[in-house]
Amino acid sequence: MATYQLSVNGQRKEVNVDPSTPLLWVLREELKLTGTKYGCGISACGACTVHVAGVATRSCVVPVSLIGDRPIVTIEGIGTDPVGRTVQEAWVEKDVVQCGYCQSGQIMSAVALLKATPKPTDTNIEESMGGNLCRCAIYVRIREAIKSASEQLK
Amino acid sequence: MPDKNSSRARKGLIMIRKRTLVLRISVFLLIVLAIWFTLSSALVGRTAKGPDASTSDRRSEGLVAWRQIYSVLTSPRCINCHTATNYPQQGDDRHRHFANVIRGPEGKGVPGLNCVSCHQTENADSTGAPGGHNWHLAPLSMRWQDTNDQPLSSAAVCRAVTDRAKNHGLDGAGLLKHHEEEPLVLWAWNPGRRPDGTARSVPPLSHAEFVAATRRWVDAGTPCPKGR
């Protein structure tokens, strides 16, 4: 076991966990931030996506020992970011969600895309969101919401 | 009469001695001649074809070393990130990387799905995600496969590796340093564990053997095999 000081959604958090524990389980089990979901556990589906130092990161495969002092933002904190807030509003506007399980990961990836590429093409969206799977197959609505958010961010 | 006979015998003895001396001198001269001829022809031969033979030997030694280098470069730990496509490969069967991972403009993925979305600065053996400093795909100029994911020939890979317009301007010394010190090259011999906990395979040579082969190849003038 080891103690780590983490910056999560702008707050300092101290956790005492095994160094090999994936960040996902630190967030969910230790910090009770359950908005980030467990999907496949091998970074293949994107449900566990959070931001680490602004980079969309698959929290299920990154041990907490490798986070260091990089700030973490989860779905619970992304609404304080202007781009994050706009994406969440676009998600509501387009009524994107069906079952909702993958949505926190979808939104975190979409925010990362729009921060780097404010005016994404369909190809940009397909490439950036291609690693976020949705069993409800609401990909068309996800794309519409990203484009709507992009318009609003002009 | 005895004096006459005795005089004849003395003359005969002198003649025999003279002939023996001539014979001995002749044999001696023949031996000297034979030795001189042998030595001089050997020296003449060495002088006449010396540089060619030396260059040819050097190139041959270099090509032997290159074959060893090629066996490493085309092993999965290396060639999986030297693709000609817009995606990396993974595994010993060199299948397409899962999760629809894309090369991206700089070989580091795309926003939302960067290499560092999973690959940290070191291996994560508890989760099976490999990692190393500045994880990224090799540029397309350094592709060692065709677009059907088949490894290029030894000659083609050698041409790419030695083309300074394609290899970031590396000369022989630069290539040696790259093979000796580049963190992602070194990672190939410390590739960590798969998600199922088993160890990833490593290249067919040890890193020390790989560097030694590179040094021999560089010393030989980085020769490349002929052919396509």
Image: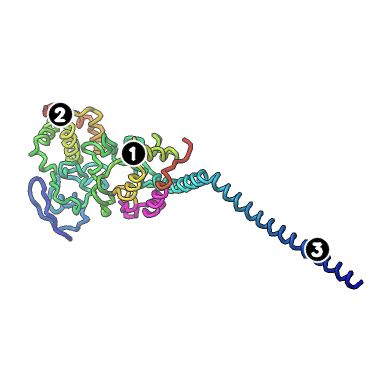
Magenta part mainly helix, strand or loop?
loop
Task: Please provide the residue range marked out in magenta.
Answer: B189-216
Q: Residue B8: x, y in percent?
A: 86, 67
Q: CA distance from mark 1 to mark 3?
A: 86 Å
Chain of the residue displaying label 1:
B
Q: Residue A94: x, y in percent?
A: 15, 29
Which of the two residues, B188 or B98, is positioned nearer the viewer here? B188
Identify the residue under disc 2: A150
Q: Say few, some or many: other residues with alpha carbon within 10 Å of mark 2 (under 14 / 14 to 19 / 20 or more).
A: many
> Looking at the image, is mark 1 or mark 2 nearer the viewer?
1
Which of the two residues, A91 or B222, is positioned nearer the viewer here? B222
Q: Residue at x 52, y 46 (%)?
A: B50
Which of the two residues, B200 or B99, is positioned nearer the viewer here? B200
Chain of the residue displaying label 2:
A
- Asked if residue A136 shows in the view, the reply is no
Q: Residue at x 72, y 61 (%)?
A: B24
Residue B7, compared with residue B226, is above or below; it is: below
Q: Say few, some or many: other residues with alpha carbon within 10 Å of mark 1 (under 14 / 14 to 19 / 20 or more).
A: some
Q: Amino acid at mark 1?
A: Asn
> Looking at the image, is mark 1 or mark 3 nearer the viewer?
3
Q: Amino acid at mark 3?
A: Met
Identify the residue under disc 3: B15
Q: Which mark is residue B54?
A: none
